[in-house]
Image: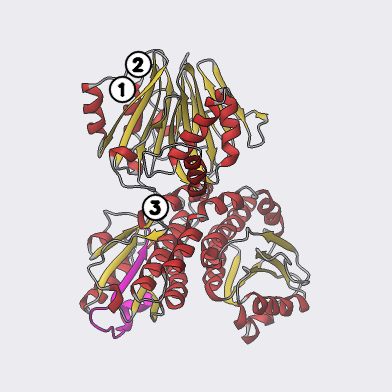
Amino acid sequence: MCGIVGILGKQAVAGDIVEALRRLEYRGYDSAGVATVENGLLDRRRAEGKLRNLEARLHNQPLQGRTGIGHTRWATHGKPVERNAHPHMSAKVSVVHNGIIENFRELKAELTADGYKFETETDTETVVHLLTRELGRGVKPVDAVANMLPRLQGAFALGIIFAGNDNLMIGARNGPPLAVGHGDGEMYLGSDAIALAPFTDQVTYLEDGDWAIVTREGVEVRNAGGMRVQRPMIRSPAGTMLVDKGNHRHFMAKEIHEQPEVIGHTLANYIDMAEGRVRFPDLGLDLSAITRVTISACGTAYYAGLVAKYWIEHYARIPVEIDVASEMRYREAPLPKGGLAVFVTQSGETADTLATLRYCKGEGQKIAAVVNVRTSSIARESDAILPTLAGPEIGVASTKAFTCQLSVLACLAIALGKAQGKISDAKEQELVNALTEVPRHITTILRQEAQYEQLAHYLGKAKDVLYLGRGSSFPLALEGALKLKEISYIHAEGYAAGELKHGPIALIDETMPVVVVAPKDELFEKTVSNMQEVAARGGQIIIVTNAESGAAGCPVHAHIQMPDTHPFTSPLLYAIPMQLIAYHTAVFMGTDVDQPRNLAKSVTVE
Ligand code: F6R
């Protein structure tokens, strides 16, 4: 994951920037760089690989500027080579960037037609040229940024410095976090407070959509509409802790809000965003010859696997066998030799999942693990690791690990579909483009968080809650119910919407909230019919949908409007309301959100 650092210092800052970048190494990176303003001119040093390579370069050719930005890059658009490493720059401006500029192809075409030459394969270079064009027209730096930001689509954070201006640094946040650090006559910018801990513990977290005009005298924060806004300066405990809650009340909230960033990074590991293609690692297996896929996992990770079953069967037309690991380990299911067995796990230590893995290995399966902790037992015992780049997940309830698992599994489904000749090049591009848009859409959903606080006042009084969904939304109904019960202790059940009339409908009366996960896909009308059945019996419907017609005339208690997106990516997006409903209800109930009773983060016993 990319890391951003900026310093307006009293003396040469390059060394301090490298030190701060070192504290962001935990995020993972493949190249690094620093740029400073020296005698009014911008200059930079960049290097492939570890920070020591950048340090060696700075040792041979020091940078003396007192104003600088630095970056550790996790390649998204373009190979991890020096040419693509940040900072990117022109004679007028230098930029570091974390995230994805989704509309970079359109911007690149526009700028190329305007005579701008692109030297890199990155999306970031479009920001440099957009700003350079503004500055070339005589627009002042702050106004140039104000004019440029609305042109960008996607989820991103930026750090910017300007030639001829030794006392200005601009940071912008649209999704991924960014913090401003306050020093004594010095000011800082960082992807998180951990990077800034050696310099200051006085931190202002930018809110989503904010941008900050930083000088040595202080910071002026503006919101997306360009209005000046006040953001509090808080004391950060990051100096003593590797992972902190930022300005969130719980780790769970922080982890929910990290999703645009970590999903972007996870996707970047499996797709070539510039080409719009899946770039899947070699599983040591001929994907075109696979006739069956076996998936096993526990809890939330199992629901990610269940979504993958729908995706793989639909897009690759390969039958998928799936079971919870605690059942599969003793079932002695017959498995055809040479098949692919996929294990999904955040911790990589779940005892049942590990035991099932060993069983499948014994049955001659090729083992692939979708895993967050790369040093874990499951990672070590697998033939191939498909990492989720979610970063440490501290809250017991899985949130960002789940959506990162879905991201990897979505790419697996496309890779299998391609290899089996079931997905054309054009379809691949369509699906990859839809995935690329996910971080931005999640950012939009997170901006509407207030409605969930309101809903919590209602749900917090319920004794039971039902969740319904069809197709790939069925696992989301299961996940919504699991999230609610584990952190709020309210009894909740998820059902396939069509199963309602086979039993659960007996529970419905006017005291029963029913959350309906209903993206506008080919199953929407059928879900609406099930919803009518609930409404007719007095059930209180909370519909989560992107349908313009909302609940299609059905009376509802609440309507959560989702962005209009490709049906393929619905599970990734609808996971967010499931998390927010549970989180805010638990906060309303006053439970221990991050460490709910009776639960452990890593379940190493049967
Ligand atoms: C629920 C949750 C659990 C885990 C399950 C598997 O929010 O976190 O259901 O998903 O215990 O854990 P991992 O993914 O570590 O194998």
Q: Is residue 592 visible?
A: no
Distance of label 1 from label 3 (alpha carbons): 29 Å
Asked if the magenta segment contains residue 498, the reply would be no
Q: Which residue is mark 3?
A: 268
Q: Are marks 2 and 1 in contact (CB under 8 Å)?
A: yes
Span colored in magenta = 325-348
Q: Is residue 508 left or right of residue 219?
A: right
- The image quadrant where one finds ligand 1 is bottom left
Q: Nearer the viewer, residue 595 or 141?
A: 141
Distance of label 2 from label 3 (alpha carbons): 34 Å
Q: Quadrant of the C terminus?
A: bottom left
Up-down: is 439 above or below 179? below
The image quarter in which residue 388 lies: bottom left
Identify the secondary structure beneath mark 3.
helix
Q: Nearer the viewer, residue 466 or 336?
A: 336
Tell me the crowding category of disc 3: few under 14, some 14 to 19, or many 20 or more residues within 10 angstroms, Cα based.
Answer: many
Distance of label 2 from label 1 (alpha carbons): 8 Å
Q: Could you tell which of marks 2 and 3 lies nearer the N-terminus?
A: 2
Q: Is residue 327 visible?
A: yes
Q: Which residue is mark 1?
A: 15
